[in-house]
């Protein structure tokens, strides 16, 4: 996502790295890289020029405070870090301020009108927003007002069944009449919000706009949301201008931002139209609608990750109590392949690996530019674990050469791939077991303060000795049976 823009800021940072004093020439070189990347990413020309001017004005001629105090400690800041901070502030300002609110009036049933061009992902986004409202305690109903696109009504009905939400449709009626009738039908169904999935066109035309204006006139929606495909580049700005001029939209939802290396629409659309970006559509899952946070996106563009966004994703799919229990098991070293499989499934629910890694503050250790993380790797790991027996998953130490060969045949993976997974699993389990035991060596390997060892001993429950004894008994019993078989021969 936004690889072109991120690449430009990375080059600018590299140009300034290690310089004790930054002169105007250095700033010019860095800004040139940023300007090129923004233009290549389809950011609107006037937005680029305005952004560059603001960064340049703040960066040139300013005295940089290289030593600052924070929480009673003296910290050293480099001129390069100061320049990146200026870029971060201006990026957040360009896309902000934050306004993800939806207005619900005093009527028994509020209306949200979803508009946009054909192919922008409007129908799926309507279902995602309905799911978002459902989780917020609302009772939404979706309305199939697109009577022109083949299978549009059927698609919304399928999405409604997946979410267990009602879908209103009325064959033979015009879209304005369908939307008007839907407001009355919603009260009978006990719904308090309706979402109109309106028709789109490949281009903005008068026929489309007149129909949308008629729907607005007869339903008076509290919110008009424009769904914009981030991959159409600068054309998104023209689309936004026209829809806002004719309908006075409330805000935007950007879709397909996770599949676009350019993503110039994210930086252009708020500045040009003056209306807020409310949500980002990330991925195909109906839960993948993120509240827009300009600070988080600015941080990701600059390669600093988005921990707040990652935590929100995590909270969406993880039970807090279960997560604490799993953490205790991991630190006791009592972590099995079944536990590992559960964690993989949680990761898959949170989105693609590329997106998850982009939200980590890895800096220069992140994914190299242009490199794609293969999400199928999770499927391969899952296949290996599913090819194990119940006993093998619960007792990782029992895996030997014969078992590895059988698992390899069962999952269709080479033996070295199975062995590689086992090696990584055992290394992680060993490190966490040592960490849980308070061993300073393990803490050092993890880059932690060895003085934490005592505190960890007090807080982490010890592994039950009975389990270890039972395992030892079973192992000795198997050895005795093998000896008895050899004697009987």
Image (cartoon, rainbow, N blue to C red):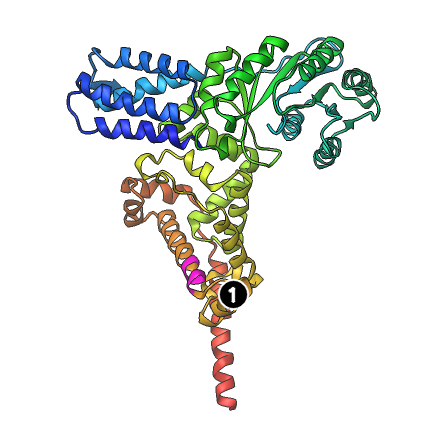
* Residue 48 included in the magenta stretch of the image: no
Please report the bounds of the magenta region as a residue range: 416-421
Q: Position of residue 193 (x, y in %)?
A: 72, 19
- For the question of whether residue 367 can be seen, the reply is yes
**In front here: 174 or 254?**
174
Q: Tell me: 138 left or right of 305.
A: right
Residue located beneath label 1 in the image: 407
Q: Where is residue 60 in the image (x, y as percent from the top left)?
A: 22, 13
> Tag 1's secondary structure?
helix
Indicate whether 405 appears above or below 343. below
Q: Tell me: 103 left or right of 145.
A: left
Indicate whether 233 appears above or below 57. below
Q: Tell me: 102 left or right of 215.
A: left
Indicate whether 397 appears above or below 377. below
Q: Residue visible at 27% across and 10% down?
A: 57
Q: Residue visible at 33% across and 16% down?
A: 52
Q: Position of residue 17 (x, y in %)?
A: 21, 29
């Amino acid at each position: 996502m936004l690889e072109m823009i991120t690449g430009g800021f990375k080059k600018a940072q590299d140009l300034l790295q290690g310089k004790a004093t930054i002169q105007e020439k250095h700033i010019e070189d860095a800004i040139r890289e940023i300007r090129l990347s923004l233009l290549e990413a389809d950011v609107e020309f006037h937005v680029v020029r305005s952004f560059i001017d603001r960064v340049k004005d703040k960066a040139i001629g300013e005295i940089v405070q290289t030593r600052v105090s924070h929480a009673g400690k003296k910290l050293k800041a480099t001129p390069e870090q100061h320049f990146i901070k200026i870029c971060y502030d201006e990026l957040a300002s360009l896309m902000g301020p934050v306004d993800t609110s939806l207005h619900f009036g005093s009527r028994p049933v509020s209306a949200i009108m979803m508009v946009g061009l054909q192919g922008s992902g409007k129908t799926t986004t309507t279902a995602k927003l309905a799911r978002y409202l459902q989780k917020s305690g609302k009772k939404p109903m979706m309305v199939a007002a697109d009577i022109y696109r083949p299978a549009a009504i059927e698609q919304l009905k399928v999405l409604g069944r997946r979410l267990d939400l009602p879908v209103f449709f009325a064959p033979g009626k015009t879209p304005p009449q369908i939307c008007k009738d839907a407001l009355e039908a919603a009260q009978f169904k006990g719904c308090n919000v309706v979402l109109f999935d309106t028709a789109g066109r490949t281009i903005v035309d008068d026929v489309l706009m007149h129909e949308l204006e008629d729907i607005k006139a007869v339903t008076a929606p509290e919110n008009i949301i424009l769904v914009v495909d981030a991959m159409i580049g600068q054309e998104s700005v023209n689309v936004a201008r026209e829809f806002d001029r004719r309908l006075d939209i409330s805000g935007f939802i950007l879709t397909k931002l996770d599949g676009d290396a350019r993503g110039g629409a994210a930086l252009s659309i708020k500045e040009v139209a003056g209306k807020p970006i409310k949500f980002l559509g990330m991925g195909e899952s109906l839960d993948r609608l993120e509240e827009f946070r300009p600070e988080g996106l600015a941080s990701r563009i600059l390669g600093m990750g988005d921990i707040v966004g990652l935590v929100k994703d995590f909270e969406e799919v993880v039970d807090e109590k279960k997560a604490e229990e799993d953490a205790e098991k991991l630190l006791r070293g009592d972590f099995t392949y079944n536990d590992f499989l559960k964690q993989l499934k949680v990761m898959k629910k949170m989105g693609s690996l590329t997106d998850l890694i982009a939200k980590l503050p890895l800096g220069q250790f992140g994914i190299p530019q242009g490199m794609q993380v293969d999400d199928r790797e999770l499927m391969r790991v899952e296949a290996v674990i599913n090819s194990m027996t119940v006993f093998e998953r619960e007792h990782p130490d029992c895996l030997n050469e014969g078992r590895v060969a059988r698992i390899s045949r069962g999952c269709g993976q080479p033996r070295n791939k199975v062995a590689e997974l086992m090696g990584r699993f055992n290394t992680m389990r060993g490190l966490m077991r040592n960490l849980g035991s308070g061993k300073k060596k393990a803490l050092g390997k993890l880059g932690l303060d060895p003085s934490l060892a005592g505190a960890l001993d007090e807080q982490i429950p010890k592994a039950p000795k009975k389990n270890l004894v039972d395992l030892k008994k079973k192992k000795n019993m198997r050895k005795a049976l093998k000896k008895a078989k050899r004697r009987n021969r």
